[in-house]
Amino acid sequence: MGHGWEGVVLKLMRGKDFTFTVTGAEQVGENFRRVHLTDGGMLAQTGVHPTMWVRVWFPNAGRPHQRAYTLVDADPVAGTFALEFALHDGPASDWSRTARPGDTVDATLQGTGFSAPEPPPGRLFAVADPASLPALNSLLDAFPGVPATVWFETPDPADDALPLRADPACHEVRRIPRRDGGRHLVAEVTSALPALLAGDGDPYLWIACDTVTTRSLAGHARKELGLPKERVNALGYWRP
């Protein structure tokens, strides 16, 4: 399958192409699906880092359709990982629902990266939703034992069953129902952060929800709360 003009641009930006092969799939809750794959030699070339993602090309009525997905439980030695899909209408979700062992899908590695904060965070603050859940889990895995407060927006009550890798000993999870296009989440986070930040010498704020909400929260953290830009990592994961 050709990748159209987007594929050409990614090639010019030194994107590397790989072909993944499905080894299995499973339903994880009502609105989430996990697909297991082999990596086509990718991880041996690139290694693995927290929140690592790839652009995957899905069939869409004969035209290329790419979306970015975070690697889950990547194993460079075995050359395997999984992708997790928050299910809704669209080519990527449709593909995940029908993926069977032996199916293949093309992917391009371009644009991913993660720089661990220095000094290491004394406390993590994370804002996420089902679309960024795999990245959130990899972030929590990367800092075991570090206290964290997580605001997790849930568009559907069934999302409470999603596999959030929170450790009750050190992670506080605040589940926030999605209301008013994300404005309810913004209000909850901005009202709570000042008190939570007080007394934490090396906090680190990670924001990964819809683009509008992410932009609003990142701007508030930097302008209103005065957090240095290197202590705020913000990336919109979808457009409302």
Image (cartoon, rainbow, N blue to C red):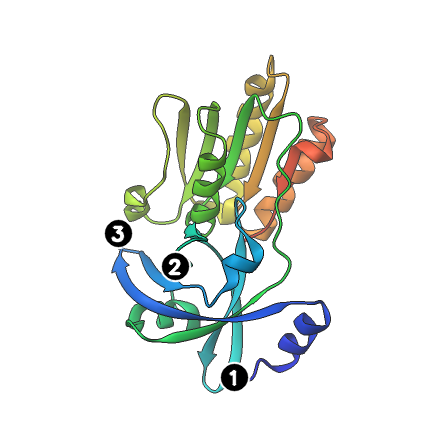
Position of residue 101 measured from the top left corner of the image (x, y, whole percent):
28, 71
Residue in view at x 60 percent, y 29 percent:
204
Report which quarter residue 213 is drawn in: top right
Position of residue 172 measured from the top left corner of the image (x, y, whole percent):
41, 26
Report which quarter residue 162 is drawn in: top left
Local SS, label 3 = loop
Position of residue 13 measured from the top left corner of the image (x, y, whole percent):
71, 67
- Pointer 2 local density, CA inside 10 Å: few below 14, some 14–19, many at least 20: many
Local SS, label 1 = strand
Q: Are marks 1 and 3 in contact (CB under 8 Å)?
A: no
Mark 3 lies on residue: 29
Q: Is residue 36 above or below residue 193?
A: below
Q: Give the residue type at disc 2.
A: Phe
Mark 2 vs mark 3, CA separation in Å: 11 Å
Residue in view at x 31 percent, y 75 percent:
102
Between disc 2 and disc 1, whose residue precedes?
1
Report which quarter residue 191 is drawn in: top right
- Which one is in front, 81 or 100? 81
Residue in view at x 65 percent, y 35 percent:
232
Mark 1 lies on residue: 63
- Which one is in front, 54 or 177? 54
Q: Is residue 43 above or below residue 229?
A: below
Local SS, label 2 = strand
Mark 2 lies on residue: 85
Q: Give the residue type at disc 1.
A: Arg
What is the number of the mark on residue 108? none
